[in-house]
Image (cartoon, rainbow, N blue to C red):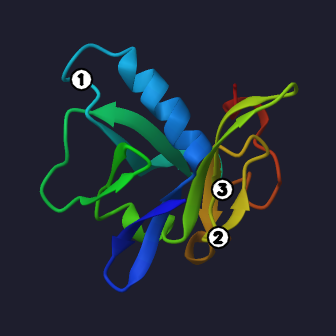
């Protein structure tokens, strides 16, 4: 595994399985459109935040950037604290396939694993907080 390093700590780890799938997907994109993988945290998930993985043309000022298994991964400064210590993997199984993020910062997460809540947000006015599922907001 490779890691993105931030100030004095590991921000994000990308497994070789994930990097292999990402390189495959990047090769299918038009030239210049998928130069880096951007991993971010976005508001609006049914458990508070949701993960965003997508391709970008390059890093932006302030981004943390690292080469991991042949993939350049960037994380913006807002997302970095929420992703600190997280691992991005790719699972290819019979029941389900896709990217999986194991995030030690999540105090609870949606049943589908696409959104999460951190400890300092626990108990916010979210009817799904701690419910272990998120109802209709989690289509695969």
Identify the residue under disc 3. 126
Rendered residue at 54%/47% (across/down): 50
Asked if residue 110 is positioned above or below residue 97 in the image, the reply reads below
- Reading the chain from its start, which is encountered first: label 2 or label 3? 2
Question: Which quadrant is home to the N terminus?
Answer: bottom right
Identify the residue under disc 2. 104
- Reading the chain from its start, which is encountered first: label 1 or label 2? 1
Circle on res. 3: none
Identify the residue under disc 1. 33
The Cα–Cα distance between marks 1 and 2, rounded to whole angstroms, is 31 Å
Q: Position of residue 38 (x, y in %)?
A: 35, 44
Q: Secondary structure at mark 2?
A: loop
Kindly report which numbered mark, 3 or 1, lies closer to the viewer in this rendering.
1
Question: Which quadrant is home to the C terminus?
Answer: top right
Q: Residue furthest left?
A: 61
Rendered residue at 12%/57% (across/down): 61
**Residue 102 in view:** yes
Q: Position of residue 54 (x, y in %)?
A: 40, 34
């Amino acid at each position: 595994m490779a890691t993105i390093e931030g100030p004095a700590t590991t921000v994000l780890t990308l497994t070789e399985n994930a990097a292999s799938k990402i390189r495959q997907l990047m090769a299918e994109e038009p030239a210049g459109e998928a130069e880096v993988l951007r991993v971010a945290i976005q508001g609006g998930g049914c458990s508070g935040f949701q993960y965003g993985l997508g391709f970008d043309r390059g890093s932006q000022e302030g981004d943390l950037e690292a080469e991991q298994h042949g993939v350049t991964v960037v994380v913006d400064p807002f997302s970095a604290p929420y992703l600190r210590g997280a691992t991005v993997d790719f699972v290819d199984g019979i029941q389900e396939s896709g990217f999986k993020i194991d995030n030690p910062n999540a105090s609870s997460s949606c049943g589908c694993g696409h959104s999460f809540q951190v400890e300092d947000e626990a108990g916010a006015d979210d009817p799904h907080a701690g419910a272990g599922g998120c109802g209709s907001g989690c289509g695969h």
